[in-house]
Amino acid sequence: MAKRFAGNYSAEPWRGYGPGPPMIFGMMESGLDFRQAAERIYPGGSYGNGSAMRVAPVGLFCYDNLAELKETARKSSRITHTHALGMEGAVLQACAVALAVRTESAELDRGVFLDDLHGVVESDVFRDKLVTMGALLAEDASRPKVIAELGNTVEAFDSVPISIYSFLADSGFEACLDYALSLGGDRDTIAAMTGAIAGACYGLADIPARWLDGLENRDYIEGLANQLWQLKTDRMGES
């Protein structure tokens, strides 16, 4: 996976990467193990939201196995984000996607959804954010208050909770993304994470056709999705 990341960056370095990953990839090309490279750039590890942003396929594939989900999410995060809070952000996002897959949109209970997420977090900072999310949803809080209490920065402990909140604050794929984008901050990543959860819950049919028609590399992305589904169904058939 680390080699694939480095290859993708080498092929398209203009994609708007942050400063850290390209430095990691450069060290890898010099023969340094990616784990050592990540630690060298970010002493103690990065707790940004990059690994949470990309973790959705783990939530889809491991939706029925929490232990495997947590282990795989941490491993995928560790390539670039080795701080405990960075990895926990990826785990929480993957768990939100997994819960959304298992939830019929018409039966979504926001309180139950948050309660289920409480059971997977280990740090006080994420626990506190989940409690705050419940209170904000109960009062239908204003956007400025949501931003002030949850945060909208690049740190995983801000952007992952506010992405989950954006999913729970509205109904329907497009409405959830519109809400996420309205919160500002690191909104492209926040919207990406919100969209991953909302897509898992509401399904492909709820994504506006005008968005799909303009999607770059649509055939490639849909092909990857079908391969992931086939791998999962093959495994389930073997068990």
Image: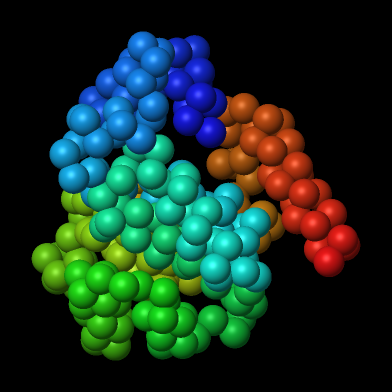
Q: Quadrant of residue 69?
A: bottom right
The vertical placement of 110 against 165, above or below, is below
What residue is drawn where x is 52% and y is 54%? 72
The vertical placement of 192 against 128, above or below, is above
Q: Nearer the viewer, residue 44 or 136?
A: 44
Q: Nearer the viewer, residue 123 or 31?
A: 31
Q: Quadrant of residue 205?
A: bottom right
What residue is drawn where x is 29% and y is 52%? 86
Quadrant where the image shows the C terminus: bottom right
What residue is drawn where x is 35% and y is 35%? 35
Q: Is residue 130 left or right of residue 117?
A: left
In the rendered image, residue 153, in percent from the top left (x then y), is placed at 19, 50
Q: Is residue 239 visible?
A: yes
Q: Quadrant of residue 40?
A: top left
The vertical placement of 20 against 166, above or below, is above
Q: Nearer the viewer, residue 2 or 92?
A: 2
